[in-house]
Amino acid sequence: RTLCDFRRNEPASLVLPLHLAQLPGIVFHLRRSSALRTAGASPDRTAYFRHLASSLSVFAMLVMTQPTLVAYQLGLTPSPMPLESGAMAPDRLLLLDSFTQVLICKGAGLAGWLRSPEHSQNDELHKLVQAANDDAALLELERFPAPELVECDQYTSKARYLTQKLNPDVPLSEFLQGLYRATVA
């Protein structure tokens, strides 16, 4: 009861202090992270991620636990996006940083424009892609171990890496509702 304020049996009344506001989201992503999830991973891969988790800085571990997603769109400045399936759009380029992997995924419309002869010379499109590539290169430069760089288009086979991060088994909102119900019960 000292960590938050709430009225008994009223999940909507739960209020976390400002310094703990991010904790439920971190717990949500931590349970899905490679540091804890071992299903479908080899013992070597599990040991690798656990070693990383024990030797990384707090910020690096937070990025590994809760990846960052940045959206690039024509005419707009790059902006952070929530890790939700709604973040993917045909006219959007996404940069996902999960510490061990940096992924650049072009929306289907954007990828089609880049392949078409009439749009292939469009400077704005190329500047958009170059901005994402530059940001990815910066992430690669400052990181050890160096992350794997993956470039893909929406709906291609490599886009599964992004889809896996954006489509959790239980949505964050449902996780939070269950957590708040358990807390106030």
Image: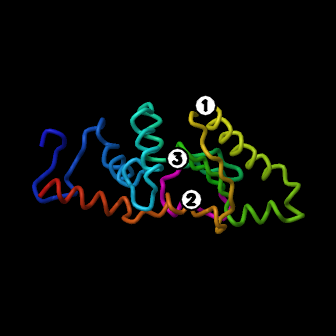
**Is residue 61 positioned above or below 158 on the image?**
above
**Res 161 label:** 2
The secondary structure type at the circle numbered 1 is: loop
Say whether disc 3 or disc 1 marks the residue closer to the N-terminus. Answer: 3
Residue extent of the magenta highlight = 81-92
Left or right: residue 64 versus residue 6 is right
Say whether disc 2 or disc 1 marks the residue closer to the N-terminus. Answer: 1
- Where's residue 76, x and y in %? 66, 48
Viewport quadrant of the N terminus: top left
- Where's residue 97, x and y in %? 56, 46
Q: Distance from label 2 to label 1 (Cα)?
A: 22 Å
Tags 2 and 3 in contact by the CB under 8 Å rule? no
Count of marks, rendered view? 3
The secondary structure type at the circle numbered 2 is: helix
Say whether disc 2 or disc 3 marks the residue closer to the N-terminus. Answer: 3
Mark 3 neighbour density, 10 Å: few (under 14) some (14–19) many (20 or more): many
Question: Residue type at mark 1?
Answer: Glu
Q: Which residue is mark 1?
A: 142
Residue plotted at (56% across, 58% down):
162
- Where's residue 141, x and y in %? 65, 33
Left or right: residue 172 versus residue 125 is left
Taking the view exactly as shown, the residue that stands out farthest to the front is: 43
Q: Which residue is mark 3?
A: 98
Residue plotted at (58% across, 61% down):
88
Left or right: residue 133 versus residue 28 is right
Question: Residue type at mark 3?
Answer: Ser
Mark 2 neighbour density, 10 Å: few (under 14) some (14–19) many (20 or more): some
